[in-house]
Image: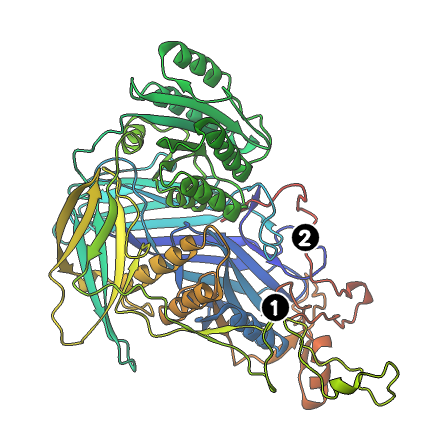
Amino acid sequence: MSNCGIYPTVGVTVRRNDYPLVKASCEILVIDVNTLSKLSQTFVSTSAYAQDVNYVFPLPSDAAVCAFTAIIDGEHTIKGTVKERQEAQSAFNEARRAGKTAALVKQHTSQVFEVSLGNIKPRQSITVRLDLISVIAHAGINDCLRLRIPTSVARFYGAPPASLKGHSEGEIISFDFTATFQMTGNITSIRSDTHPVTCTIGALLVNPEERLNPTQAHVELHMIELLREDIVLEVRSNGLDSPRCFVQRWSPPGHGMTTDALSLTLVPRFKATPITSQDYVFLVDRSASMAGGRIRAVRDALHIMIRSLPSTGTTFNIFSFGTLCDSLWPTSQQYDQDRVTTAATHIDSMEADYGRTNIASAMQKVLEARRAAQAGVNVPTAVFVLTDGNAWDLQPVFRNVVRVVKHSHNATRVFVLGVGNQVSSEMCDGIARAGRGIATYVGEQENLGAKLVNLLKAARNFAVDDVSIDWGAPLDIEDDFVIVEPSHSGTTTPAGTIAPTSGSRAGLSLSDPSADLKEVIELDPTSQIPSLPPPPTVQQAPSRQDRLPPLYPGSRASIFALIKTDRAAPLPKTVHVRGTMSGSPVTLEVPVTAAPSELIPEDTHAPFFHSLAARALIQDIEDSAAASSLTSIATAQIARLGIEYSLASSQTSFIAVDNQSTDVVSPVAVSDKAETSPTVQRRGPARRRKRHLLCANPVSSESDGEESTVVVSDPRLIFNSPSIKNENSNSSQSPDHRL
């Protein structure tokens, strides 16, 4: 099986494991429902040639990289800073051409990241260290957290991002995993159905010397093997679902603005109003990736779900999808015993035999079926998507979900059951957010009952809508901005008119020797650079024109806000949540507590809760563009948040350059027996104009467009293609990168 790791960027055939992963560790600090993780992986080059290398790794879709360092040969450390994505790429390319060791961290999707390392010499060791922040997803069970640590980039259907290339084969490695928990209530249990973990409840360390504290726990996992599935921990803690709000104040050095970051967590508990009449549509992933335990879990879940629908006022149907999509009945049928029996027989026959995962087309099929059956009447509809979400085509899926919901005037909601031990939370959570529903996850061997009960309860009842939060400051939702356009000389002409020419009264000669035939028209579209105003007083996420997504009973909601304030102002005392359910108002007052500073690491660029809030704001901006592509305003807003709060994102990357190194290493073979140093060409003024011929590697596919040929002593090693040629790759399927 193919795995996450380092691979060369150059166009030569390489041996398996030229850059093997020899050690990996992950340390996670869980604070309430939020995490700060430190991921470390050490690779050692066994290649006989100097090469640029890339390192691909998975992350939870709700995580963000907030710090990055690379350690060369265990001695020299280079630290990353955040820049706009293209600026960071250009800086990396320039440093590499100048012979400097450099590193670049960039995001392909919200759950696939890549580190590029330039000018790596033979036999060098590379330790990549990343700090991550995230919010833990709700487990679908009361007072329970589900912490998932992805160990691989799964085999996804479709074309991956163009810049995601190549991979290396995995080997047995040493892997250490530790998690420390600091909860607000007593921890009652910790379990893992995926890996054999050692757990100590009552302390942050094993064999503690201090007095036991039941709100703390420590988990360890030591393995010397290839990680074949994600690590999943479920933690139960008293009062975990109680409403609470933390505040943290930050006055960055040299910056005049002081901000409060607020983190509101609540699991609504209220007597819900049932929906008296509703259509239930089950959209079942039967692609090849669902084979084995996943399709068995799907069959078990469907049997429970179709027998848990309301007895009256219910219609239902089952769609199956893969490469194609079909349904049990042409239209939804009335819910009765005969049709449930027919559906049960159909479910028993389900296998993962529908080819590839094409969720986007399946959602389009559901939309068309709804339009045909309901004839313009917006019947309340709950769509349940049962899938592992393993597909690359995220945006078409989200667009179709948004279209389904919008066409029904919000009468349709989409819920997701993520099935399997390796699920794309980016896809599943994204569908749920776009569909105004919720997502729940189950493992292949997991007891489904409790989680399905909460998911079905959410679908059978009205949610709390029109949700707003009073943070104690006005919520500014105006989109004031200025488009700064490139200046042009001369006068302007209104669009659609023809500018007059001098001497037009006398006419034009069709043979004028003095005529200047050179065109002065600008043919390329001019780039419009948005100049953003200062951030508003209150930035809230999630937010849709000052309203939040629906709140469902038993489903955790995490809401963040960044609020401008005065350094000497008192901390806020309470926040107020308001909304409506079936036309009746609902309210909730939540006290605000100062974040305990001793539990918040100070070695990150921005404080813990500020980084979490900025990550939530970035996700909210991207979700707002689910129905279309990001605008220039949106990309500028994401870039500003990423740079200000030091986060890697779709518009920002980490760049680290070792300015001490100025050597360019030629990819000359090094004997496996002799301790021969690689050939080093020192750059001098006379060579500068030919530097692109002396760099160790050609420009990669995301470079600034320059293609080069490497000059080497062995003519057999000359190449000029930036693409990867890996003899272990499989062109028919996307790679599966593992730790």
* Quarter of the image where the N terminus is located: top right
**Amino acid, disc 2:** Arg
Closest to the observer: 133 or 8? 133
Q: Is residue 274 above or below residue 26?
A: above
**What is the number of the mark on residue 264?**
none
Identify the mark at residue 15; answer none if there is no mark: 2
In this rendering, does residue 590 appear at all?
yes
Rounded to the nearest angstrom, the CA distance separating label 2 from label 1 is: 16 Å
Q: Which residue is mark 1?
A: 121
Q: Is residue 360 left or right of residue 561?
A: right
Identify the mark nearer the N-term, 2 or 1.
Answer: 2
Residue furthest to the front in view is: 505
User: Is 706 located above or below residue 153 in the figure?
Assistant: below
Q: Is residue 264 left or right of residue 108?
A: left
**Element type at mark 2:** loop
Q: Residues within 10 Å of mark 2 (few under 14, many from 20)?
A: few
